[in-house]
Amino acid sequence: MLRRVLGAIAILIIAWLVLPTLVIIPMSFNSASSFNFPPKGFSLRWYENFFTDASWLRALGASLQVAIVTMIVATTVGVMASIGLSKVRFRGKALLENFFLTPLIVPGIVIAVGLYSLFLRFNLLGTLPGFVLAHTVVALPLVIINVMASLQGVDPRLEEASASLGAGRLQTFFSITLPLIMPGVTAGALFAFVTSFDEIILSLFIQSPQLQTLPVKIYYSVTQTNDPTVAAVAVIAMFTSVIIMLSAQFASRKRKSVSA
Amino acid sequence: MSQISAPSRPRVTSAGKVGSEANQRAPRNWKPFLLLVPAFLIVSLFFLAPLVDVFIRSITDPRLGLQNYVWLFTTETNITVTVRTFGTALLVTVVCVLLAYPYAYLMTIVGDRTRNLLQLFVMLPLWTSILVRTLAWMVLLQDTGPINGFLETAFGIGPLPLIRSTFGVALAMSQVLLPFMVLPLYSAMSKIDKRLLPAASNLGARPITAFFTVYLPLSRPGIFAGSITVFILGLGFYIIPSLLGSSKEIMISALMYQQISVFLMWGQGTALGIFLLAATVLILVVVGRLSKGASMFPGVEK
């Protein structure tokens, strides 16, 4: 009895979590030029608009570029930091680990204003390095969480064995440690990509007309114009992040079965 | 190579000095510290430095002094906005606890497959950006949207203020923040011994009494952990209130944006930011003390 009631509640909650977002899909095939639901007719005109409009395509290109570079930087730096944290022991270690994770809980708008103020002075507004470094700050914690979780399953004796057989530190890392923690690294990298690809608050503050990522352009389009093209763009952005997160889920599944 | 024989406690005098002392006293173990340098530099320069800069601006702009904080605490609008922000975050937290509690409990009594499925469904929404999800709510909640359309044809009530109201903001915020409540709740509940409830009823407690005197207190760490995360994240939300909220009923984040981008009042905007930051830290410290052992970072278990 209780189980049935709870099951019904759970189904309602799942519906409330998942269904509202899907409304954007029929909207993107609307043939009328409005946001009214239900849409009238079927057309691909908003997708056509997106793929023929240079400013939308530029925003997509900028987003992909920023997300890929952020993924590379955050993953490299995050893997190094995780391995460093797993090897060193000193009194402030927990503090340092928390320091790396803090960007997850500090209100984004406060970091955004600080970065805006700083970037204004150092001419980093609307630049690729500016975007990448800002996004790395919020992507790094996710890489560290995933890689640290993978590292916990690695037997330290394997590295010692490798070292005793004459392998250097780098060789041990690339031939022993990295393959073992690869699922965590992959998941972390994909999380980093999606974090950057979807990031909006920091991006709103550090953008300039020279470099606008897709979420920034979507936000301005929604608040300033009333162009239904955003529905198509939102669907494209949604599928991009869902596909990548599915891969991340798959990667971390592998991690669980490896460590089990 | 010689990690086993090396003195295993590199002595570091203060928490801040990561490298220098350790270098001299434990020469064999300093290399791993180098691995921490890039992350330390990036987080220091692009996270800590901006926050310090916000603080400095709040006490120096336009001139040195606490005038921005005096403005912050004496202007009536600010007090209204602060009360509204905290009220909305609290409302969202309560809604999330009420919805997440039965959901998380169900996760503890079903089989592995169903549990994985329930977990997947609660994580699924995190895979889509807040912006896209807010956009979808705009379509649904607008005055000419399907919900208002249905209300009008079915009950003949005119368009309700679903959008540009606290209702719309709280609805969308709860939807986005629910996963951050379900996961810590489930993690706390899964540690509760399942034999305790039957034991309580054997001793004569009615189910409701058993729940309130045995189960609820034991699940408190999860409630605390989830509530802190949801409340803190809720305080800083910007996108949802700005797209679904009323421009007359703004929250702290929007007021900050307004002060800086519209009025160019950097001092006042940054003072608001420091206030938000201080509130966040204070809640973490105070509630963190009450709920020992729970991790404050969503998705990280200790």
Image (spheres, coloured by chain):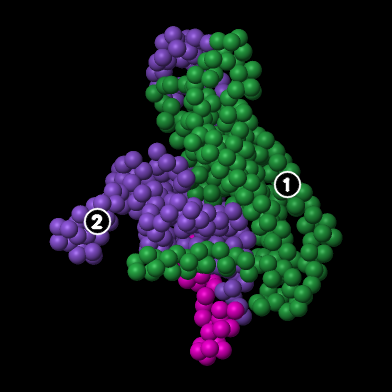
Chain colours: A green, B purple
**What predominant SS class does the magenta segment belong to?**
helix
Q: Chain of mark 1?
A: A
Judged from this view, the residue extending furthest toward the bottom is B156
**Vertical placement of residue B142 versus A178, above or below:** below
Residue A95: percent from the left, percent from the top? 42, 31
The numbered mark at residue A64 is 1
Residue B166: percent from the left, percent from the top? 47, 69
**Vertical placement of residue B39 versus A48, above or below:** above
Q: Quadrant of residue A94?
A: top left
Q: Are marks 1 and 2 on the same chain?
A: no
Q: Kindly identify which residue carries mark 2.
A: B197
Amino acid under disc 2: Leu
Residues shaded magenta? B146-173
Q: Is residue B187 magenta?
A: no
Q: Element under label 1? A: helix
The numbered mark at residue B83 is none
Between residues B110 and A175, which one lies in front from this camera angle?
B110
